[in-house]
Image (cartoon, rainbow, N blue to C red):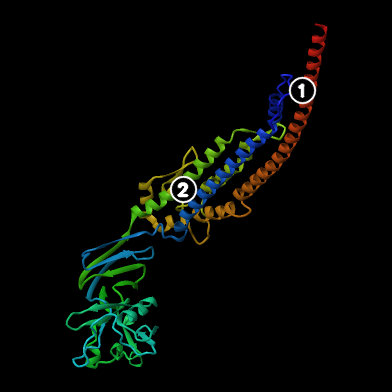
Amino acid sequence: MAITTAGSNFDVQGLVSQLISLEQAPLNSSKNRINTYNNQISSLGKLKSTLSEFQTSLRGLISGSALNANKTDSSDASTLKGTAGATAAAGTYVVNVTSLAAAQTLALTSYDGSSGKITSNTQSLGNAAGGNLTIAFGSGSTLNVTIGANASLQSISDAINAKGGDVTASVVNSGADGFKLALSSKKAGTEGSFSVSGGSALGLGFLDFDRTSSAAANLAKRTAAPSDAQFTVNGVAITASSNKVTEALTGLELNLFKTGTATVTVARDDEAVIKNVQAFVDGFNKIKSQVDSMYKQSSNQVTDANGKVIGTAVRLDNGARMIMQDLTAEMSVAISGVTLGSGLGYLSQAGISLQKDGTLKLDSEEFKKALNKDATAVYKLFSNNNTDGYAERLNTKLNKMLGPDGMVQVRTDSLNQQVNYEKQKQDQIQARLDMMQKRYLTQFSALDAALAKMKNQSSYMASMLG
């Protein structure tokens, strides 16, 4: 609101601005409090993320997959390779591959020595009505494909591929024999073998193929016959419909590349196990670092709307430190049924110790020694039948901390309420300041006008006396 003086040289606007500036102290304090609350909300969000990451690292320890990591080695990787999961049994497996799995392929054309050949991929071949083409697989599944009127090889190929089934189609120009429709199963072995029917009703009889028929005219359409992989493991015969074998041995995947013999060795992968355990230690320490950072950076005083000190942000965020104390306390509690003299009851006995500064430290060599001495006892430190392993107990606490009634969410909700309260308070303060400014401007403008009038009267009287 711009104000011009009436000639008294009285700075109404400047005076009112200074007065309002002095009255804005509560508003500025409220804005500072909102900034503090928002910083705390942001820190709690980061803490929540860090707690969730740590909880993720616990899952493999609870299931055992992180501690049962295995590695494999093949004596001839060009013949086959193995990939061992957590449930694979350590040992040596002699694998003799006698045949590989292969997928069925067909090359379908009207050329048979008398009816001619297809000279274009867009040549109209089908009847004027169209209909359905059925592809039946050895696995028992079927694929029904709608073929349009006056179909060409290209339109048939497009229709089959559009279904997204277990067969792919393409049009091939073979040269002397003209264009052909090539069909290939996506799955190897007898389960991926397939028959094609319905072609005759479409005026496309050359498409029909019976996978069970041994007729020469029928088999002539097949460019590759389906076959299962045949191999032995330590002398035991196994048949598989794929060269990627996942069900022959528990936890061990075999990838077959060619016929021949190779030895696959499965052993515990100590380096992978150490890496997984180190992730657990690092996750715990990351929480500790973040909580310490939150506690240290929140030492600003908190004041009410009148500027009175009502506490400190440290006290308000002390719940974060309680989270760390709660997690740390679990490190000094042994698993049930085990004592220092009777076996592994504490993480420190396996090389994971709590330091004076509250962080965890992993001694990888000590951990490996514990694994080699009694791997089962090490696994039980993290997860066991009593569900009191360290990973299990920490996971339970994290579920509560991160739940709707946990400290993180409750504290965040409380801070958001404080922010909303301050915003409402700011609206009230601003409304009062606006009214105050309007009143001051009216009052001082009136004073300015009165002073100007007095000045004019004084000047008039001085001129009369002169």
- The mark that comes first in sequence, 2 or 1, is 2
Q: Is residue 177 visible?
A: yes
Q: Position of residue 406 (x, y in %)?
A: 61, 51
Give the number of the mark in front: 2 or 1. 1
Q: Position of residue 88 (x, y in %)?
A: 35, 66
Residue 448 bears which disc, if any? 1
Residue ranking furthest to the top:
466
Q: What residue lies at 21% left-to-right and 64% top-to-bottom?
A: 75
Nearest the viewer among 115 and 425 is 115
Q: Position of residue 344 (x, y in %)?
A: 45, 52
Q: What residue lies at 55% left-to-right and 47% top-to-bottom?
A: 45
Nearest the viewer among 89 and 61 is 61
Classify 159 as above or below 438.
below
Q: Is 43 situated left or right of 104 in this image?
A: right
Residue type at mark 2 is Gly
The residue under label 2 is 283
Classify 432 as above or below 128.
above
